[in-house]
Image: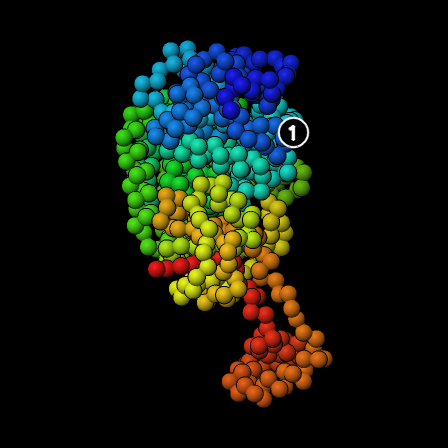
Amino acid sequence: MRIRSVLGILCLSVTFLSSAQLDGNTTPTYHELIEMYQKLATENAEIELYAMGESDYGLPIYVCLLNGAQDSLRTFEKARKSTTLLINNGIHPGEPDGINACLLWIEEWIKNGKKTKNMPVIGIIPAYNVGGMMNRSASSRANQEGPDEYGFRGNAQNLDLNRDFIKMDSKNMFTFATIFHALDPDVFIDTHVSNGADYQYTLTYISSMKERLSPSIAGIVYDQFLPFLTKDLGKKKTDLIGYVNLEGDVPEEGMSAFNDLPRYSMGYASLFNCMSFTIETHMLKPFKERAEATLLFLKSTVDWMSDNATSIERARAEAFRYDRESFVFPFNYELTAQKDSIQFKGYEHSYPLSEVTGLPRLKYHRDRPFTKYIPYFKTYAPTDSVDIPDYYVVGGQCTEIIARLKANGIEMEPFVPKPYTSFEQYKMKGFKSNDRPYEGHFIHYEISTELVKPLEVMLKEGDVLIPTNQRNRRFVISVLEPEMPDSYFAWNYLDSYVQQKEYFSSYVFEDKAAEILKGDTELKRLFEAKKSTDQEFAQNANQQLYFIYQHSEYYEPTHNLLPIFRLVR
């Protein structure tokens, strides 16, 4: 929806912030921010603002487009066909550096005559976490230097939206998916403020794990864009380093590359071969300085994209082609022991006794800066892989899963039951679960499955057939293969299928168990062998009866069978 048709949505009386205020220690409220974007869109034909959908708070999430086509359908079509940058602000509203930086960038762009030659289409989400924006205070981030007031990390559901990109518990994420797939960005940037150690840098970044990317995307990001960015920011007297992800208590013990699983914004975006980055400014630097550093990162990105549009488009095309030609999908990446080094600008530290606890506490000394090489662990390797099938089938009853697939533009068609002999079904062998909820879920890990011939009753009309020969196949595999770390199984969307529904009464089953063992010599052999090698089992009557029950005709055949099927032609 274009802003000129929605100006009546927010009938507010707010004070329009000046650029001087934005360049100080103040960041706008949600209502002030949207009024500012509305004013920009009303006064500048090159700027458009669209209400793209609801947030959990009930107020809309907007996207502002620069250098579009001044018409909603043609603008989004132009974005998909052009080189496009998408910037997400306010996912953690207590980290508002990008909110101010984008407004300052637009103001500067207008003052400089709104240059559009070779400029990418730029999409800006002014405020993604609307509920967090509304929950405003001056004290929820105890370790951060400004601004005077800011929003809260949790959204209206108290979700951390930067853990919600795969599971999609929030209305916010359904709206984000609408924005993301409408624009199909080539580059995505999420703006944040870091926690952690103290050091000299104001500006750090996270780039998607190199080893998980398609070769063409890894090449252009790590061999071209990041070297340009480091050099260009250096000319502007701004040091840049990767996110300081500590391996120990202090930087001298080493830092490591971040594993951007698709639960995070940039990990999600990279599933669609989008070059993805998170800006992490340092919490202990003044807000004005942090916003300026974010602004410089965004400006350098726009400059690089303007000069390299052809290379960017070629790299993405090659990446999608590479995906279609791959037969194996590696996963479960772990940091290797390979140790590199990186020059680091930090501060010396000590462990004086705390005035509060009387125990040693960590203290950094800003009056004793250093520049030295520290260990850097940046190489990941997959520990598992899966052969890619030609199709998946998802049970039609899995409405929450199907809705999420559709929201992400996944091609599917109705499944027509027929006697396929090459279908396989996933059966759960084992998994572990968190003992406390994590973002509303008891997430599963160390997942183990096997493929079995499906029961005929479980393939039916109403199921959906999903080809893997489609543009967004990385997403399909990442959510439907149960052993993937952020699969729909891992996020509890298939838990009912691993719960046993039928059982037995021990005192009744005793006589039947004896009959079963008399009639099945192989089962009796396995049963006796287990008793002789497993002391706990030998002393537990219920375990023994359950073992016999599991291996009998009475055990429910659908237990642990997931409604996820694979077809290889």
Residue shown at 49% from the left, 37% from the top: 177
Q: Position of residue 565 (x, y in %)?
A: 46, 59
Q: Is residue 374 above or below residue 128?
A: below
Q: Position of residue 265 (x, y in %)?
A: 48, 38
Q: Nearer the viewer, residue 274 or 285?
A: 274
Question: What is the three-letter code of the residue carrying label 1?
Answer: Asn
Tell me where residue 184 sits by quadrant.
top left
Q: Relative to 364, is 118 on the left or the right?
A: left
Q: How is the image coloured?
A: rainbow
Q: Nearer the viewer, residue 447 or 461?
A: 461
Q: Relative to 1, is 71 on the left or the right?
A: left
Tell how many labels: 1
Element at label 1: loop
- The crowd level at tag 1 (other Cα within 10 Å; few <14, some 14-19, many 20+) is some
Q: Is residue 217 above or below residue 304?
A: below
Residue shown at 57% from the left, 77% from the top: 553
The quarter of the picture where the C terminus appears is: bottom left
Q: Position of residue 512 (x, y in %)?
A: 65, 83
Q: Relative to 300, is 491 on the left or the right?
A: right
Q: Is residue 276 above or below residue 418?
A: above
Label 1 belongs to which residue? Answer: 135
Q: Relative to 171, is 80 on the left or the right?
A: left
Residue shown at 53% from the left, 26% from the top: 51
Residue shown at 38% from the left, 36% from the top: 275
Q: Is residue 483 visible?
A: no
Q: Is residue 471 visible?
A: yes
Q: Position of residue 310 (x, y in %)?
A: 27, 30
